[in-house]
Image: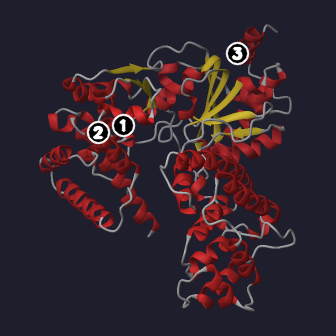
Amino acid sequence: MTNHAEAIEAARKELQTMTGGAESRDDALSRLASRLPFPANKDVDDLVSGLQALSNHLESHTDRALSESALVREATRALSDIGASLWTDVFPTIERVHLAGMSMIESPLLDFVATIAATTPVDIHLYLRSGTGPLLTRRLESRLDPLDLPVRIEQHGQTTTSPPTVPVAELTASTRREETRIAMALVAGLLDEGTSPSDIIVVARDADTYERPLSHAADIYGHELSVWTQLPLTQTLPYKLLISTVRLLDAESVDAQTLCEPLLFGWTSPKDAETSPISYDAVTGARREFADEPPQSLTAWTETLGDSSFPQLTQLVEWARQCPESPSADEVRDVLLPLLDSHRETVLTDAPVHDSKAFSEIARTARALTRTETLVDELATKYREWVAREHTSASWGSLVELADAIATVRPGRREHANASAIDVLDATDTWLRKAPYVIAMGLVDGEWPQPTDGVFPAPLRDVVVAGDTPDAQTLGIQESWMSERERDHFDDAVTTATELLVCTRFETDLEGARYERSPYLSALDPIQIGHEETQNLLSQECLLPPSIRHIVEGSTGV
């Protein structure tokens, strides 16, 4: 069921990227689909009709925007209808809008940008990346040039089809685990040569894949890592505790499920240091016992619970009743931060016992807790601004939407600043960054580059990306449909290095499947580090290969 829902959501995003709900682009997509061979043409029709029916059904049951794309469309309509005064009222001092580091531009966002350019005196600058930049430039020019809009398009980054500007070395490991040891041994060797930890970056196409084995290898060599993987905050225990509690505080009439959810995610009384979290089985039992109770106020729940065998539930109700109904920004902090403090003291410290399979990583939960605490501060600040501008009402319910908007923004800094830690980054996060030494891991075909994919049939994806017809040119391109997306990530990683780039790869996985060398390495013409030199690097002395050591000594002046 979860996989099916994820596939539907992925298809919805792909459709929004292509058409953005514009009737002219919907028609263009329909014409393209009609020219596809069977069964691709039928598959496209079925997907589009199913997604449109689902959207119509949802829209008939709510007056809220169903997605970010829908919200952007509403903003575009409002700006188009009202004109420049709407923009200047909200953003009186903004003179230029930048879209930077884009590997794709969804149709709704492009419509919004075009409307800003057409109705306001604001300059628009689009900064594209090295791999997808040429393709996107052609597509954007075909859509924007006829409108004669003041939109400037620039491409940033050097493509790796050109000779590298720094020396490049390549090391080969038998397995991914050995590859991580090689990376950490390289770090140890660089540090021994006097290199600062802040001058070293470890990069992978998907840092999540490497986080666990790299952490094990780092422990062996005594390194501390700062892993910059995108934290899926909305899927973590602390965030779910926060949101379930806010929803409880917002509800005028509370059903048993809403009442029990904070306990399910580890709620403990911020006012009682001796309290302990209720077990999952106990929460399930409480849900069953009160399942037939009608939705009711918190006061009524106090009477319903009476002398029940769930004291934590009674504590939760009493605590919630004492919280303000229409909180100020300061009250948001005063209520939610002690809640997270209590979670840290009573739940996180007992994580090996109470962590479920979905939240088994103690470090991940600790990181999520720190980020959620930061989120509360950001949330309170934004909440104060929105209430003051009358963009929202002073209520707990307003915080749910704000929290989701803030939590899904990709962080642009470390979760924990630590000058002694070695940064481990997703390749996409190296855009416009510089560091003397970069270790790029996982240079195997199938991982770097990864194959293109999508929910819509491949024949349609290929036609849209090619853009050989007017109908195809009018549609947006999903990032995962373009092989150039992988070039973006690789070029970013390569051009981050200012002194030395070291590329590593493995030959077999745990099941014994063999992996071929990444085709991207051919253009770099790297120095090949042999088996004996690799083993010396993995020795207790962590001896850098002579070719690498000479480069390091030259750059450090040793």
What is the C-alpha distance between the residues marked 1 and 2? 6 Å
**Which element is circle 3 on?**
helix
Tell me the quadrant of the picture where the N terminus can be found: bottom left
Report the residue at 32% width, 25% height from top. Answer: 137
> Could you tell me residue 152's position as x and y percent?
35, 20
Q: Residues within 10 Å of mark 1 (few under 14, many from 20)?
A: some
Residue 86, numbered label:
1
Write down the residue under mark 2: 82
Q: Residues within 10 Å of mark 3 (few under 14, many from 20)?
A: some
Residue 56, numbered label:
none
Please tell me whether residue 84 is drawn above or below residue 480 in the rendered image.
above
Q: Earlier in the sequence, mark 2 or mark 3?
A: 2
Report the residue at 66% width, 73% height from top. Answer: 264
Q: Cβ–Cβ below 8 Å for labels 2 and 3?
A: no
- Residue 431: image quadrant is top right
What is the C-alpha distance between the residues marked 3 and 1? 61 Å
> Disc 3 marks which amino acid?
Ser
Look at the image and tell me whether residue 128 can be seen. Answer: no
> Could you tell me residue 548's position as x and y percent?
71, 18
> Disc 1 marks which amino acid?
Leu
Write down the residue under mark 3: 547
Tell which of 18 and 535 is nearer to you: 18
Q: Cβ–Cβ below 8 Å for labels 1 and 2?
A: yes
- Residue 60: image quadrant is bottom left
> Could you tell me residue 298's position as x and y percent?
63, 79
